[in-house]
Every structure is written in structure tokens, then in C-alpha cells.
Image: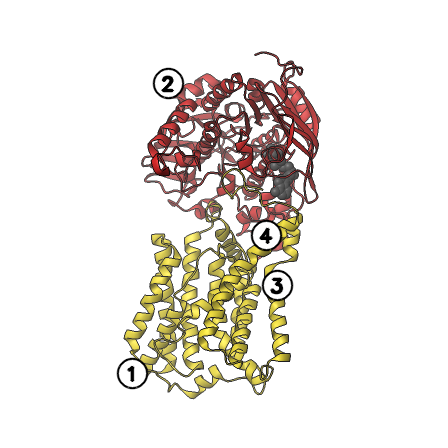
Amino acid sequence: MADSALARAVRWDTVVGALLIVVLLLSFTTVDGFGNALNLSFLIGNTLPIALIALPMTLLVVSGEIDLSVASTAGLSGAVMGALWNQGMTIETIIPICLLLGVVCGLINGLLVTRLGLPSLAVTIGTLAAYRGIAQIVLGSDAVTDFPTQYLDFAAGRIGDTFIPYAFLPFLVLLAIAVVALHATPFGRSLFAVGASEEAARFAGIRVKRQKLILFTVTGLMASLTGIFWALHYASARFDNATGLELSVVAAVLLGGIDFDGGKGTLGGAIAGVFLLGALQNVMSLQDVSAQSQIVVTGVLLVLSVLGPRVARQISVARAGRRAASASTSAPTTS
Amino acid sequence: MTHLSDAGPAPVLALKDISKSFGAVRALRDVSLELFPGEVHALAGENGAGKSTLIKTLAGVHRPDAGQVLLDGEPTLFHGPADARDAGIAVIYQEPTLFPDLSIAENIFMGRQPRRALGRIDHKATHGATLALMQRLGVELDPDRPARGLSIADQQIVEIAKALSFDARVLIMDEPTAALTGSEVARLFGVVRTLREQGSAVLFISHRLEEIFQICQRVTTLRDGALISSEPLDGMTEDDLVRRMVGRDLDELYPKQDVEAGEVALSVRRLTREGVFTDVSFDVRRGEIVGLAGLVGAGRTEVARAVFGVDRWDAGEVEIDGRKLTNGAPSTAMASGLALVPEDRRAQGLVMDMSIERNIGLTGLRTTVKAGLMDRGAERSRSLDWAVKLQVKYARIADTVNTLSGGNQQKVVLAKWLATGPKVLIVDEPTRGIDVGTKAEVHRLLSQLAADGVAVLMISSDLPEILGMADRVLVMHEGRLTAEIPRSEATEETVMAAATGRAAA
Ligand SMILES: Nc1ncnc2c1ncn2[C@@H]1O[C@H](COP(=O)(O)OP(=O)(O)OP(=O)(O)O)[C@@H](O)[C@H]1O
Ligand SMILES: [Mg+2]
């Protein structure tokens, strides 16, 4: 009991929130060009793709699953958008088609996982390759850049001279929806149960498969929305848009204290993780750190973020004066 | 049975003035205990009294805050279960700790398999040794099947076999019989007697008092972590023991009310799940408690799982109040008013990492809702209500259930399902691991539910419980329903005869 009190005192998501504030303050004072409104709007705008996908990814990881195909879905949706635009379709028809495509991508992942009982890690590594391949077939090596200006302006612009990109506002709405869905609805409550013990959840009448199918589908939808945003934000639809974005999303979500084994974490933590990662990437760019080195940093963060919460837990257990007790042969006993 | 005097041999293993706290909970206070060779020693006490904590301290899982563990009179400190095992102490923990992906044989001989040349594991010898152990316990379990999916009773048997597989000087058993039926218990006791005659010391925990009187010579009683008494069982009565455990006299253990049975609430017709059970048909009426008896492995749990929908059935149908249930859909079963208290509380009944409040709340996700959002106030009061009704012993309702003692975890599972206000309640081993006082309470509750018009189907390996509570007893044998016995004719003999397939009913 002292253990759980302590664990509450050093909750990982609070740690990440504090870390984010520290990094922001340090950057304001020590990094040239960080604090101006334009740079901050770049920071937010460049982080939005990670943030958008992190919303459903958080729910997915809480329920014990993962989707690594998100960046490829985003790329595919951008590529289809470019190809259809080249054919002269209006953007107002293209966007719903792309979103529908995202739904289909997510549905395929979800069906493979829930109907065939395959592990989502394997399934989505497969579709990661497949969706990206289709994107290349659809658009080849073209880059489509001539989307309507009012769309480009919305995706890249900011409100007046403030640091807030236009696109940040709809994100806040989506964030609010996700927070409520995960932390205030019966659906969210049952996701935690599913992630912590799928069998017990099933015995409590929770429709585990249906829930997972919904989550994968929503993740596909959000990934394609991100793909559309990406193509407009950078004014470029290419088949390799957003390559490697899944790494950043997963790193950020885990960094935010969402337990990779499922059942634990908060959306607040995940979003703090996202912006912590975004701030670090922004600072590294300002300091002329190469893109390759940035990926190394992301990778290291990913490892640390899996390690961090565990170490924090170990410390609080040790501090409560208890030895991690493992009965005769295996760990999963009471201690 | 010979009476062992205190002037006899020195204790092999002893605890001296042991204290152990978990945060604010003082699980053990200044407890002493001595285990003598050739003696079976019972440890008695209510749920949460500190029995399992005492055993884990003996075995080196917990380090005591104060006091000593003495091995052959020498102060020792075990640094973990492996240490204790090397000292010749075999422990069966209350909750099975098998590796699901390893075979039964591998689980039993974990880390000490017989070897062949070049250190290769001798599978044949392992297999043979496991078979021999199974024969000793009189069960038919395939040594090569993985532990995953074993029933709780079978898991307990594997744990027992594991403990017996090394020649322990001290055998410690925390509720080994909780899910076993009479015949398996008899086998186990046979083995324990042999061990005792060979000079082993045995520590035994059970909430079935008759078992304590059958096999033990001495009993130590704990209450709220404190030592109440340690004395020979000779001349003691069950009432004496209960009084030491709970500090008062007990009400009737089987307070069965006579209720006029109403309409059929649950109707199971020709239900079949291939290779598991065949052609099972029965009704349960409102107001009735129907007992489902049978040996371990007869298929009782499997029928319950299929009716509730966590497993699919291959043929047949299930109706509640005349409305057919969908195959394999627990959520619709729940919506029609069915509740299942499953046999395995840790894997099926509870999310161990979740709080007591939220575990009970899991069955209320449709009801404790306001405008689509969780109504936290309603959730908390619903959980608190039922935790109090079932006398769950906890520090805070927001504590995770893995900090609770085994019996208290069981009460949380009951609370979780009773809170749904079911029309049909299936309980699978409802009092497994629950102490006598609370057992009476659970029985009273079941009886009251029946009186209020709930149809109750009760699976239990505890025959006296079935006989004491059931209006009718259904008996299964090897996947088939073999007998239906009215309360007036149900006796240990008639039920056991049907359960072992000896009777044509
Ligand atoms: N790991 C733990 N963390 C916090 N409290 C614990 C822990 N383990 C046990 N306790 C508390 O210690 C007390 C004694 O628990 P213990 O498991 O020893 O009871 P028990 O006598 O074995 O009960 P039962 O008959 O129900 O198995 C209980 O109040 C329990 O909640
Ligand atoms: Mg116990």
C-alpha cells in the first residue's frame, strides 16, 4: 500500500509533463531562435502529424495492441490524393475518398488481428510494407504540389502573428474527444481492462474483438487524415511521405508512460510525450543536427521510454522496503 | 494415529516472533510456529488472517520485518524460494504459479530435469517420472500437454506433484485442496500420510475444517495477524476451532431457506461442445438452487462457460426466460440477466492490476453511466455497497486487488457479479478459499437471492456444500449428465456413485 502511494507520487506521466516544461524553459533561455512565434508555430505544425496519430495509438496500446502501418497509411492516403488530383478531381471529393481508404486500411489490420488472431505487431509490419508499396504503385515517383491555395494556407498557416497554427484548433477538438473517450466513457474504461487482462475482460462481458476492430479502424482513419494534412502542410504529395513516422508516434506514446504491455497510461502523458519529442526534434533542427542523428535520438528515446517507467516502478517498490518477491518459479504471483 | 508429545523430536523448521507489515497493514505480529518431523500441522484463520503471508515468510518469498526463521534450530534467512527449496522445503502456494507454455512435465521438473550425456534433457525420463507422480496422486493428466488451459483443480494437482517431486523434509501447502473433490483429496491425504510416516513435517492450510481434522495432529490459529493458539487437535471439536478463528460462535453454515420454485428461468437443451461435453439438458427455476456435482474434469465448468458464452457450443440451445441466447456472446447473456462467477478468480474473475472499485465496476459499465459518460459517484457507491455487503477486508477501495488475500479476492468476484442483480446466477466454486464465517455468509446470500426469485446454478467440489445448499443435484460424469437427484435423496453416497459413473440413474 505504501508502494501504491509512492507509485502515485512518482507517476510517470507527471514526470514527462515536468520534463516537457523543463525542456521548453531551457530551450527558451539557451537556444537561439527557439522562442519566437514563427519557430513555435513550426514546432507545433511539425509535431501535429505525430500528435494526431498518437491519439488513437494511445488507445490501441492501452488495449494491448499496436499499429505500425500508420505512416504507410498516411503515405498511401497522400499518394492517392495526389493521383486523383492529377486526374482533375476536386479536393472536396478527394478528401472523403482518402478518409474512406484509411478506414479500409485500418479495417484490414483489425480483421487480421481479431478474426485470425494474429499478433498486431506482425500484422502491421506486413501492412506497413504493403500499404507503402501500393502508394508507390499509385503515384510512382511523382510529387504533386499544386493543391488549392486556401487548403495549403490552412494546413501551413498560423493565426495572425501568434504561434498557433490553424490546424492546431481542430486537433484540440480531437484531443478532447480522445481524452473523454479513454478516461470518461465505459468504452475507455473497458479498454484498460482488456489491456490488463483480456480473459478477465471477456468474462466481464466486454466485447473485446469488436472494440479492437473499432480501434484499428479509427487508427486507419486518423492515419489517412494525417496523410492529407501532411501533403497539404508540406505542399507535397509523394509516395514516401511520412516514412518512419510510426517510430516517432510509438516512441512518443511510450515516452508518455503508456505501458507497452497494455492496461496503463493516460492520454495527457502520451501528448506530453509527443510534444517533448517534438520540442527535442525542433531544437535539434535549430542546432543543425542532421536528420539521421535525429532518428538515432528518437530510437534512444524509445528505448529509454520503455525502460523509464519500469525503473521508476522498481525504485518505488524498493523504496517501499519490499523486495520484488517472486514465488517459487514464476513472476506472476502475489508478492 | 499416535499422539506426539512436545518432548519428542526438535522442530525442523520454526518461526520465532515474526512480524510483517505491508504499509499500514500488519499482516503478522509476533507470530511463532514450530514444525515437527512426522507431524501434520494445520494453520487456521479467517481470510486475511495472515496465513499465506506466514508461509511466504517461511519460504523466503517475504523477508520478515522482525523475528527469525530457524532451520534445525539454526537462525536462517532464505533469500528466495530457491534457497528454501535447497534446504528441503517444498511449498505449494495458494495461487498456482505454472508457466502456461511449458508442458506439465517441464513445469514439474523446471530447472532440474533428468539429464543425459552432454547435458541434454532426458525427456523420456522426465515423462516417466511425471507419469509416476500422477499415478501416485491417482489422476490422469498427460505429462506432455501444456499447462495453458488446465482447470484450476488440475493446476493444483500439478503444483502438488511438483512439491512431491523432490524429497522434501518440510512440505508446506496453502489451500491445496480448495478446488479438489473428495476422491482427489483422499489421494492427496494418502500421500501426505506416507510422507508423515517417513518423518516429513507438513504444514497444511484449508478452509474445509473436516479436512484439518482428518489429516492434522496440531493446529495453529491466527486472527488479524496475531497468534491465538497452537495446540494438539486431539479432543478439539470443529466449534472449538471456529471459535478460535473468528472469536465467536458461528451461525448455521448451510442456512437453506425453503422456497417454492417458480417458472423455468434457465433452460439448457441438448447442449454439446465436441470432445468436452455431450447432450446436456437441464432447467433451473426461479427460486431454486441447483447443485452441479461431479469429479474434477467432468465438464461442469465447461458447461457453465458455454452457457455464459465465453466458449461456443456446437449444438443445442440455451434459453433465459424463454428467450434464446446467442452462441458465444457473453454480453448478450449478461443483458438477459445471466451472471457467471468463474472458477479462476485471478485469470477470469479479476483484473489483478485494477482497483477493487473498478473490478466491481466492470460489470456496471452499462448501468453506472450518465449521458454516455462514466458516473464515477455511482460507480464508487455501487462498488462500496457490495464490498461492504460481502465483508471484503481491504484498506482502501482504490487499492489494487492483488494486495488482497485469496479469500478476499474471491469476495470481490462475487461482489462484481451480485452487483448486476442477475436473474440467473451461475457460480463456479463460489466459496473456494473462503473462510467458514464468510462461507456461511455467502450461503445465506445465495439462499436469500433464491428466495428473491433468482435461479441459482451452483458448481462446487465441496460436497457438503452441495448437499447443504442445493434443492436438486445434477451430476456429471465424463461430459454427460448422469443423474438428477432431489434434495431428499441426495447423500454423499448417491452423488458420488453418479459422479464416478457407478450408478445408473
Ligand atoms: N502484497 C501485499 N500488499 C499489501 N497487502 C498485502 C499483501 N499481501 C497480503 N496483504 C495483506 O495482508 C493480510 C494477510 O493476507 P494473507 O494473504 O496472508 O491472508 P490469508 O490468511 O492467507 O487469507 P486467505 O484465507 O484469504 O488466503 C491481508 O490483509 C492482505 O490484504
Ligand atoms: Mg491465503
Please state the chain letter of the residue tagged with numbered disc 1 in the rendered image. Answer: A
- Letter of the yellow chain: A
Q: Spatial distance from mark 2 to mark 1, Cα to Cα?
A: 80 Å
A209 or A156, which is in the foreground?
A: A156
Q: Which residue is the site of mark 2? A: B502
* Residue type at numbered disc 3: Val
The image quadrant that residue A119 belongs to is bottom left
* Residue type at numbered disc 4: Gln
Picture quadrant of ligand 1: top right
* Residue in the image at 33% along x and 66% along y: A129
Element at label 2: loop
User: Residue B100, image x and y in percent?
Assistant: 43, 41
Q: Which residue is the site of mark 3? A: A15
The image quadrant that residue B496 belongs to is top left
User: Residue B143, image x and y in percent?
Assistant: 37, 32
B480 or A18, which is in the foreground?
A: A18
* Most distant residue in the front direction: B118
Query: Is the same chain shared between marks 2 and 1?
Result: no
- Letter of the red chain: B
Above-or-below relation of B69 to A58: above
Q: Spatial distance from mark 3 to mark 1, Cα to Cα?
A: 50 Å
Q: Which residue is the site of mark 1? A: A87
